[in-house]
Structure formats: C-alpha cells, structure tokens
Image (cartoon, grey):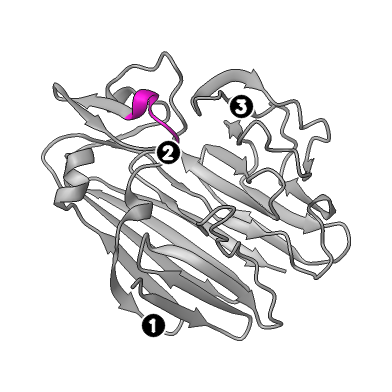
Amino acid sequence: MTAKASIANRRLTVSVKSHGAELCSIRSASGVEYLWQADPTVWPRHAPILFPIVGKLAGDRYSHDGRIYAMKQHGFARDMDFNLIDATRQSLSYQLLPSPATRKQYPFAFALAIYYRLKDNGLEIEYVVENRGKETMPFSIGAHPGFALTWHKDDRIEDYFLAFEKSEKKEPRLLGKDHLLSAETAGVMKEGKELSLRPDLFDRDALLFLGLQSRQVSLCSRHHRHRLTIEFPGFPDLGIWAKPGAPFVCIEPWYGIASSRNSKPALKDKEGIISFLPGDVFHCQVMISID
C-alpha cells in the first residue's frame, strides 16, 4: 500500500504519496481542494514527476553507447517508490536512487530528490538531480500538476481561464497523433495574456509553449476571486493539458519536450535534454500559491 504523508499550516494542508513522490492534495483551511483527485475513469494521476525524460521518444526507444533502451512517455520516476528521507511539520523530502528496474531503462548513476515546503499560502517544490556516475548524464525533468476546476459547487470548465505573466506572442505547438512534436500550432493565444478554458481545448492533446516569456501563470475564475498561481523561474517550456471535457487542467513547467519524428536516436540529442558532467548537481523550483 502506498504511504502518504501530510504537512500543514494555518492556510493549507498538503499531502504527498511515496509512490512517485506525487503531490496528491492541496486543501485550503476553508476546505477547497485545489488538486485534481485522480479519478481512475478519467486520469488516474494527480501531479506526476517527469524524469528522466519529458514527453515521448520516437518509438519509445533511444540509444546510448551502442545500446538501445526502451522508455515510455515522461520516464519512470512517476511509477517508482521514493524513500521519505526527512519530514517535519511543514516539509517533506523524498529521494529516488538507481535500481535494477531503472537501469534497464536508464543506465546512469543518478540521484533524484524532491523537497516539498509550505510557505504561508504556498507550496514550494524543489527538484534536485545529481550525476553520481563517471560519464556525462543526459536527462530532462518536468512537473505535471493537475488542478481541479471545481472550487465552487456549480463551477463549469468555461468559468476558468489562465492568466499569463507576459503577453505570449508565439502560438503553442501541437503534438501529432503519435504524441511526437509536430510543426503545427494551435492558434489559441489571440487574447495575448489570457487563455480561456473550454471542454474542447485539448481535443488535439497538449498545448506546448516553447521558449515561454512568462515565468508564472495564474488559474482564475470569472465568477469568484480565488486564484492559484504557479511560478517556475528558469523553466524554458510549459505544457498545458487536460483530458477533453474533464474538470481539471495541468500546468506543466518543463526542462525538455517530446521528440519529433525525425529526432536523432541518441538520448543526448533529444530535444531539450540537459547533459551533466560527473558530480554535477541540478536544481529547479516550482511555487504554487493560493489567493
């Protein structure tokens, strides 16, 4: 059975599962649940961690050092049991280390740590990747939190919109039917700083904002004053996704994107990949705040 731990302050209660070190609840003191509750008939996840790839590989395969490895979309971290290495009243720390199951997919000596810290009306999530091996380690990492669109009883998807920090002049890219990056754009950002949600917005799958100008996006309602803001300093790309017609939206800061059909097979050449030398340590943070 998956263990679950919780932290709380006077504003928020947050819960995290050891399986995938996955955030599974952000609940306000007034009882509003802001995180999607993983309905297994719709989308059975809350906020998976994407590592060591973001998006899909062509053919779910890559090459490294003369060998071919298989890895599914978004990597394996979301399906692994993490160790809870530290817990306080307002913080939780998780770690994933290599195992026979990870080495079959990814032959590198990594350490992945996830830190959850409550900060008044917000949750800071820090991702730390270490290269503990003797060779250059290619990886990507991304967040995939799904936020409920049911803050009030009678809310509809159409009541919500995303407010970008800056005007995004570049239209988001689309994925093909094979879930690989296509050259096609979505044509949805005519409002500049605002993206209205609607049930059919994701009929073509995710919207990929590559080279995003904004460093924060707010989820807002047209009928009440609640606002959820996700800040992602340093992340170059952002995915927005939901199951069509489902009452949630995923706001996904990424270091890395899906491969295209003509991608080179080596993992080091994958789109958006980070290559770290032995001993290198990578840090990035996401902040989710509730107003």
Give residue 203's position: percent from left, percent from top. 68, 34
Is residue 106 something that shows in the picture? no
Q: Is residue 237 left or right of residue 226?
A: left
Q: Is residue 157 left or right of residue 222?
A: left
Q: Quadrant of residue 268?
A: top left
Measure the alpha-carbon separation of dots 3 and 2: 15 Å
Q: Secondary structure at mark 1?
A: loop
Residue underneath mark 1: 88
Residue 222: assigned label? none
Residue 54: assigned label? 2
Residue extending farthest to the right is 223
Amino acid of disc 1: Thr
Q: Residue at x 49, y 74 (%)?
A: 15
Q: Quadrant of the N terminus?
A: bottom left
Q: Alpha-carbon neighbours of circle 3 within 10 Å: few (<14), some, or many (≥20)?
A: many
Q: Earlier in the sequence, mark 3 or mark 2?
A: 2
Is residue 276 something that shows in the picture? yes
Amino acid of disc 2: Val
Q: Is residue 193 left or right of residue 239?
A: right
On screen, residue 281 above or below 114: above
Magenta-drawn segment: 54-60
Residue underneath mark 3: 174
Q: Earlier in the sequence, mark 2 or mark 1?
A: 2
Foreground mark, 2 or 1, reads: 2
Q: Secondary structure at mark 2?
A: loop
